[in-house]
Image: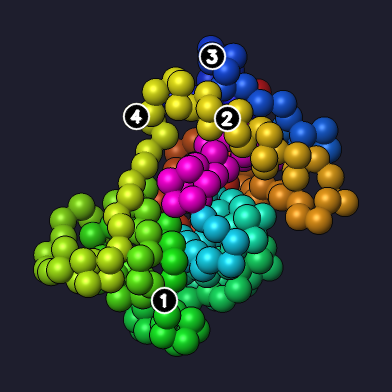
Amino acid sequence: MALLSGGGYAQYVAVPEELLMPVPSHLTLYEAAAIPEAWLTAYQLLHLIAQVKEGESVLIHAGASGVGTAAIQLTRLFCAVPLVTAGSPDKLKIAEKLGAAAGFNYKEGDFSDKILQFTQGRGVDVILDCIGGSYWEKNVSCLAMDGRWVLYGVMGGKAVDGDLLGKLLFKCGQILSSLLRSRSLQYKAELVRSFTEQALPHFQSKDLPMSLRPIIDTVFNMEDIAEAHRHMDANKNTGKIIIKIS
């Protein structure tokens, strides 16, 4: 397995050896393909950026996505409590089966009110946010005092209109951000090393106290790549979409 900087729609790729990882012995190649980008993203957000601690609560937006399903399991591995948002009952059920303590449908009312109710008014310690602008008020509302809001995507827009800084200051909160694409080779190599040591062994055996597994939604043939993108754009997938290259 390898962390790529792009160009993955190919039969062969060149990658620095520091970004290679062994394939866990009992996984299929399709399952292995679902690990690098999504799981390394989730791992760096939780472990390196937010530095999640035992017992903390973590709100994961897009909880049924590739990164989301990885983040749920890693949050449990770090002995923290995952909460998720998603857009359908089926996606919430899958998230809860993976270990989410609670799930909230963002299409049904204000999820921040429900999160505050679930946490007895305290809010969450960490937010993993791939949505951005359209969620900022709800995020700040359900962020705990001294909480960390980790931004890694802006699917809901880049612009913020309102008193974000004032409300965040009142919560003594932090905004953190990270992408993998713009990181240096040294950073990525250290991330891969840490993930290989701390997380990858938990894919090896279901006998471990906390086992991890990649979630695959659909496997498309390379000639059906356009349909795969339509499937993703329609937000139909739960977990990763895999492209089979003959």
- The CA distance from mark 4 to mark 3 is 16 Å
Please state, as top left, top right, bottom left or bottom right, where the N terminus lies in the image. Answer: top right
State the extent of the magenta-drawn residues as a range.
Answer: 31-51
Please state, as top left, top right, bottom left or bottom right, where the C terminus lies in the image. Answer: top right
Between disc 3 and disc 2, the foreground one is: 2
Q: State the SS at label 1.
A: loop
Disc sitting over residue 15 in the figure: none
Tell me if label 4 and label 3 are in contact, CB under 8 Å: no
List the residue tagged with mark 2. Answer: 192
List the residue tagged with mark 1. Answer: 123
- The CA distance from mark 1 to mark 4 is 31 Å
Sequence-earlier tag: 3 or 2: 3
Q: Amino acid at mark 2?
A: Val
Tell me if label 1 and label 4 are in contact, CB under 8 Å: no
Between disc 1 and disc 4, the foreground one is: 1
How far from the left and from the top, in percent, is residue 224? 53, 36
